[in-house]
Amino acid sequence: MSSFYYQDLYSTPEMREAFSDEARIQAWIDTELALVKAQVTLGIVPAGVDVLMEESFQFSRLDLKEMKTDYDKIGFPILPFVKQLSKLCDKETARWIHYGATTQDILDTGTALQMKKALGIVERDLNAIIKTLAAIVEKHKDTVMAGRTFQQLAAPITFGFKAAVWLDELLRHRTRLNELRGRVLVGQCSGAVGTFATLGDQGLEVQRQMMSYLGLGVPSISWHTARDSWSELIHLFAMVGATLAKIANEISMLMRSEIAELSEPIGGGRGASSTMPQKRNPILCEPIQAIAPKLRELSGSQLTAMIQEHERGVWHMTLEWLVIPEAFLLLSASLHHTFEVLDGLIVNEQAMRSNLEINGGTIMAEAAMMGLASKIGKAAAHDVITEISGRVYRNQSSLRDELFKDVEISKLLTSQEIEDLMNPLNYIGSARAMIKQVLEKV
């Protein structure tokens, strides 16, 4: 995000730093140094060259303006970079810079290094959300509220149950993230068409040692045109973004004035309207919901980058230069905003309980039906409670009162049985047991 005004809405400073020009170029430097270290170890490059390069290759010594000018002329990013490195050391040392590598080797391995740091940020922030959400689930496992289907009152649940559904989904995303790390954090340095022709039979060992220095995985075969792992990562980001947007959407819906069961953190004028002083807008939820479709679009773009020709595609790397950083930046903001919402989430338990009484408490109609079903059968019970529910609407009364007034019901159910059927906490089924199972997974 290039806008100073909006940048914190769509990314975090930490993630912007991870994908800054300095971080990118430093990753290239680290990759080149790891390459020469491996080659010195194997006797391909004279001893000591790696030490001289390590002493010389400092980001602060690069002429970035000249490097950019050369890049604009040449059109490939690594040749101007190698030219700058050559200027930092003597001619004999410069002979061995980028030895046996190709542009994409440095770009892909450098990006993998950036991803390694960035995934650490993603994992940390996801874990923070999971921990916060788990505390919400535990606190509100018995906070009864209306369950809604098709945006209508349906049957009672607890807020802890609702939040546990979110939590379980995020736990699956965390598992997916852990599983794909080994597939994503892989480098390569196999030369022009990926055969290690420039390094002969030592190529595989050079690559192995090089990745050992960098802390990256070693591929079984070159992946210049195999972009499935990166596509898997961006697809996961789109899925995480969609889950976070679902949470934000639910919170913003339950913030509606006529529902008022949840609220974003309040203070400092957050969510204020420019014209309506009373407004508390779901301002943190807004960017989370906006980011999700953008991440979905990026997933599609990265899938397009998988369809390459021959041993090197024409434009696919350039597409990834757009997709990969933007996906990390957008997800960083979504994670940050979601944590802020959940960490300060206001739960209005009184409103949750009051909303159960909307429409005369007919949200308990299914409970009443099932209470009768064991005595007269489900179909008959359904007909009886449907008719009684109609009376509630016509008389503007309550389901509880109509049940007590009904002569036939009094023959089938005791007063205590009616009271028990009208208690929402008695009709949450196995919600507590499922909540417990989710919390044990945390």
Image (spheres, helix red, strand yellow):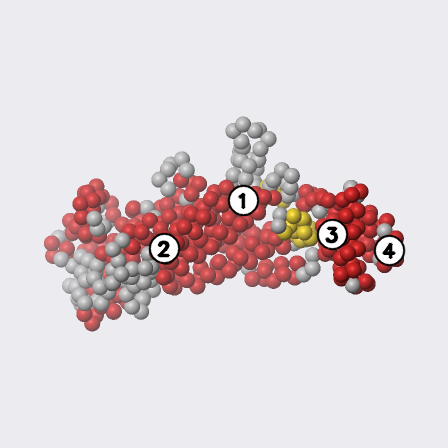
**Mark-to-mark CA distance, 3 and 4:** 19 Å
Residue under circle 1?
341
Q: Amino acid at mark 4?
A: Glu
- Residue furthest left as drawn: 91
Q: Is any atom of residue 106 visible in this view?
A: no
SS at badge 3: helix
Residue under circle 3?
364
**Residue at x 35%, y 56% (from the top left corner):** 304
**Mark-to-mark CA distance, 4 and 1:** 50 Å
Q: Earlier in the sequence, mark 3 or mark 1?
A: 1
Q: Earlier in the sequence, mark 4 or mark 1?
A: 1
Q: Residues within 10 Å of mark 2 (few under 14, many from 20)?
A: many
Label disc, if present, on residue 106 of the rendered structure: none
Q: Amino acid at mark 3?
A: Met
**Residue at x 43%, y 51% (from the top left corner):** 296
58 shown above or below 173: above
393 left or right, relative to 135: right
354 left or right, relative to 265: right
37 left or right, relative to 298: left
* Residue 184 image offset from top left, x and y in percent: 37, 61
Q: Earlier in the sequence, mark 1 or mark 2?
A: 2
